[in-house]
Image (cartoon, helix red, strand yellow):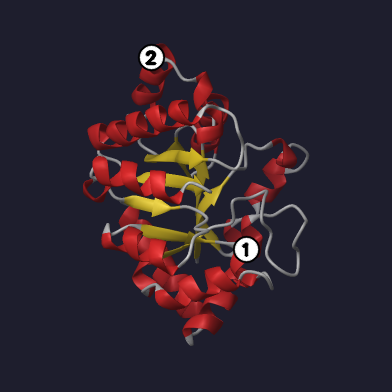
Amino acid sequence: MIFETHAHYDDEAFNEDREQLLAGMQQNGIEYIINVGASLESTKNTIELMKKYPFVYGALGVHPSDTAQLNEENFKWLKDQYALEKAVAVGEIGLDYYWDEPDRDIQKKWFRRQLQLAREVKLPVVIHSRDAAKDTLDIMKEEKAEEIGGEIHCFSYGKDMAREFLNMDFYFGIGGVVTFQNGKKLKEVVEYLPMDKILLETDSPYLAPVPFRGKRNSSLNLPYVAEEIARIKGISKEEVIEITSQNAKRLFGM
């Protein structure tokens, strides 16, 4: 059974068929799903999904692009939610320099605060880093993220950066991009990474693998990702699914 470590089923892209889609997950080979908060609103919606579906767990947090909405009052609310039994990670948190908003200093401030929060509540982190490799790494080192643990979601850098995060004992979320023809850099990273540090993820509804590239993504497409990892690693798809599932259970304490 597949462990989906990163999806956004609270996204409006699933408004028309969310219940039907999630109801069929387990019979289609998806054992667990981590739904990931990206804002305060989506964190609230993630909590509702955690309550409704026994196989859905939650990463609760605020994505760098939404950090301007954070203040001391709602940050305290966020902290209180980690007492929920099925809250298994703080995320997704990090830095995103692809967009100009919010200001980088705001992003950095709340990245640090959420790393510190993860340490406090003793949960791993799910890190989003886009066009911000050096600052992400610098802050992680300063905050001793290796003591916190977690994963770099949707890893998009090269082997040198992979080595840095590997040295911190982090896991790597690998999704649909590994199947893209122009995903050469990620294929090289997957070849380099040890299997015990790889996680399967979709980032649904985004980044659907080939042959569905450009369409709405869902966890049902994860076999295509597992197949490509298996090809790169020279092992069976079943081995990839089994190892990545054990990795996820180890990381998220399940």
Observer-nearest of 17 and 95: 95
* Residue drawn where x is 53% and y is 41% of the image: 96
User: Does 101 sit above or below residue 249?
Assistant: above
The numbered mark, 1 or 2, whose residue comes first in the sequence reads 2
Mark 1 crowd level (few <14, some 14–19, many ≥20, 10 Å Cα):
many
Q: Residue 252: in sight, yes or no?
A: no
Q: Could you tell me the amino acid type at mark 1?
A: Gly
> Is 166 left, or right, of 190 in this rendering?
left
214 to the left or right of 146: right
Query: What is the number of the mark on residue 94?
Result: none
Up/down of 31 relative to 103, above or below = below
- Say if residue 1 shows up in the picture: yes
Residue 213 locus on image (x, y percent): 74, 62
Report helix, strand or loop for mark 1.
helix
Q: Which residue is situated farthest in the top direction here?
A: 73
User: Callout 2: 10 Å neighbours few (<14), some, many (20+)?
Assistant: few
- Residue 225 vs 100, above or below: the answer is below
Residue 216, percent across and down? 74, 52
Give the percent coordinates (x, y) of residue 232.
52, 82
For residue 176, the mark is: 1
Q: Tell me the residue at 50%/78% (across/down).
A: 238
To which residue does mark 2 refer?
A: 72
Residue 127 placed where, x, y %? 43, 46
Residues under numbered marks 1 and 2 in contact, where contact means CB atoms less than 8 Å apart? no
Tally of numbered discs: 2
Residue at the spot 38% in from the left edge and 14% down from the top edge: 72
Instruction: Give the residue type that dot 2 points to.
Output: Glu
